[in-house]
Image: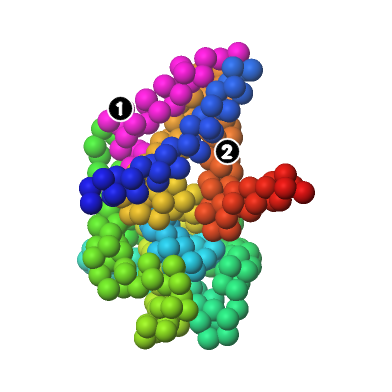
Amino acid sequence: MTKRKSNYIGPKIINTLLPIGLAFFIGGIIILCIGENPLEAYQIMLGKSLFTVKGFLNTLHDASPLLLTGLAIAITFKANIFNMGVEGQLLLGGFFAGITGASLNLSNSVAEKLICMLVGMICGVLFALIPAILRAYFHVDEMVVTLMLNYAMIKVLEYLSSGPFREAGSGYVCTPVIHESAMFQRLGIENSRLTMFFFLAFAVLIVMTFVMTKTKLGMEITAIGKNPDFAEATGMRVRRKIIILMCISGGLAGIAGAGHMMSEKFKYTLGFSGTTGLGWDGMLIALLGRHNPIGILLAAIFYSALKTGADNINMYTSVPKEIVEVLQGLIILFLAVQFLDEHFGLKERIMKLKNREEVA
């Protein structure tokens, strides 16, 4: 039994480390062409973000929303439901959590934080409910719907933040700053940016680990992912499960947006989710973590270390910090190839075509 389990885990570890190794190898060639030592550059990039106390705590801080968006992607992808709208759900949750935090004036700061997080979660759930119902009852492709809704939501929030909810007197588009009582304050450890939001995200990770591995819903997720028709034939209410999974995914994305607002941004701007977007980063985290909660934790920390290390590599070497974006892009490319191969059997199809040509 132990041998069979190790044989099952081994290829997964290799398939996870291979894209990273290839990305770092190609990145190393680019760094050599610049005239720098790639080993020294990688040592600075990862050493200062993982092996110093302040750097590691800042890495954990940046990993907080990625833990949640990675889980939001994983819980649907594992059931072969493709919620590509995590970015839009995160933005909506963060936006209205920020509006709530700027409007509330309660005497209890804990209550303010809980209300803001609840608002963010509800917004994420409601936004995910639209493609969930369309998929469950009308067989509309949720991938297309959620992708398109992302861009619709970006435009809607752009209008709201530049019009009805714009901060008066601001020189750029933004909403009012949330009250200090609604913010997650820095813990002050080694002068890092770490807040309680990381521990909240970690608690959600523990809960989702239990749900995905020890509960009936977790087994149903696996069954739907392997064969939805068979799952429905055995009496499982697949439509209801699709809606539940999409709502959980949207809720996790909404919490990620609310937490990012309350621990990092404190007001909504047009660049709230970053250049790539925390929702899109969550997809990489889920793929890199093989849709496993523990893998997602490690992937989120590693990915955040790359981001945290970008400034260090620019400060201590002549290598531009954009090399980190190159590494991220290469990892995404190799993971995408693996994902397509796993789901569509590209390698087997190519081998079959090759054999047919040889026979002919």
Q: Amino acid at mark 2?
A: Leu
Closest to the observer: 263 or 359? 359
**Nearer the N terminus, badge 2 or badge 1?**
1
On screen, residue 70 above or below 11: below
Location of residue 297 in the rendering, given as x and y in whole percent from the top left corner: 34, 48
Q: Nearer the viewer, mark 2 or mark 1?
A: 2
At label 1, counting other C-alpha atoms closer than 10 Å, the crowd grade (few under 14, some 14-19, many 20 or more) is few
Q: Which residue is mark 1?
A: 52
Secondary structure of the residue carrying numbered label 1: loop
- Is residue 60 left or right of 79 when viewed as pictured? left
Number of numbered callouts drawn: 2
Q: Amino acid at mark 1?
A: Thr
Location of residue 219 in the rendering, given as x and y in whole percent from the top left corner: 31, 69
Residue shown at 52% from the left, 54% from the top: 342
**Figure colour scheme:** rainbow
Q: Which residue is mark 2?
A: 330
